[in-house]
Image (cartoon, rainbow, N blue to C red):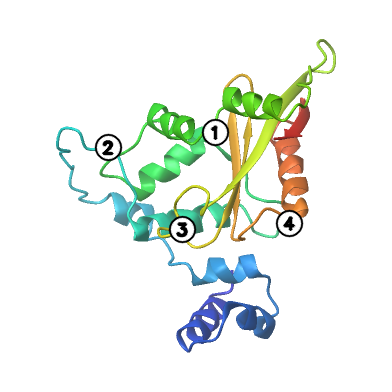
Amino acid sequence: MDPGLRETARALHSAGVTTPEICQRLGLGLEAVMVMLLPAPPPPTERRRNVPQVKRPVGRPPWSIEKEDGVRLLGRLVGHGSSGSSTPSIWTLPQLVTELREVLPAYSPSVDTVRRVFHRLGLTFEAQVEELCSTGRLFPRCRKGRGRELLYLVTHQTTRQLGLVSLLPPATVVVGLTPGNRVALAVRMQSRVSPKFIREFLASLSALHPNRRVVGIMV
């Protein structure tokens, strides 16, 4: 990303210019401008250096995200792997946990901790199957054998739906879940999901599993 463009976007924003006007002046899309306006994360070495270990009181949640850390994490999730690519960045659960540990080094959440958060949010394969069946739709079965099909149930949530409207700017998370507990997700700086976002997410799922035939079903 051009540092000059980033500085120009931030200067316009500080001067009270609206985000759509910044997009128009710079000839950029909303997502690109929002990434520019997010604070850049410090280098990993600086974040990890001399980080105090926090002793949590009994009953305190294992980790939490402050607003500044949440915005920084969102910027990393949106900007990851997007150089010259029109498809959304795909994050697997281990990659997401790695990023959380970078942003929250004092707490270092585990994969199991993050899975429990997903479970509370209803972002599990079983919960999405129940949602799918509650609408009266039939649950499909993948063919066995040569097809080597891999089923993903795909859902989406906004920061408002997740109750994070006071913590994060408007963004949409698209999540894919498999029967084997695989998790893949992508984030975009938009207040609602778009058909283009879904199409590109499904294309990225196929690229994530080049030797499988990915079947994606929206819930």
Nearest the eye: 57 or 208: 57
**Disc 1, disc 4: CB below 8 Å?**
no
First in residue order: circle 3 vs circle 2: 2
Q: Earlier in the sequence, mark 4 or mark 2?
A: 2
Q: CA distance from mark 1 to mark 4?
A: 26 Å
Q: Secondary structure at mark 3?
A: loop
Report the residue marked by disc 4.
86
- Residue 10 image label: none
Q: Is residue 184 above or below residue 212?
A: below
Answer whether labels 4 and 2 touch (C-beta < 8 Å): no
Q: Which mark is residue 165?
A: 3
Q: Position of residue 183 (x, y in %)?
A: 58, 32
Indicate the quadrant containing the C terminus: top left, top right, bottom left or bottom right. Answer: top right
Q: Which residue is mark 2?
A: 61
In what element is the residue under mark 1? loop
Residue 123's label in the rendered image is 1
Drawn side of residue 207 relative to residue 7, left or right:
right
The foreground one among 118 and 128 is 128
What distance separates the C-alpha of mark 4 from that of mark 2? 37 Å
Say what secondary structure mark 4 lies in: loop
Label 1: how many Cα within 10 Å (few below 14, some 14–19, many 20+): many
Q: Is residue 55 left or right of residue 34?
A: left
Q: Is residue 80 above or below residue 37?
A: above
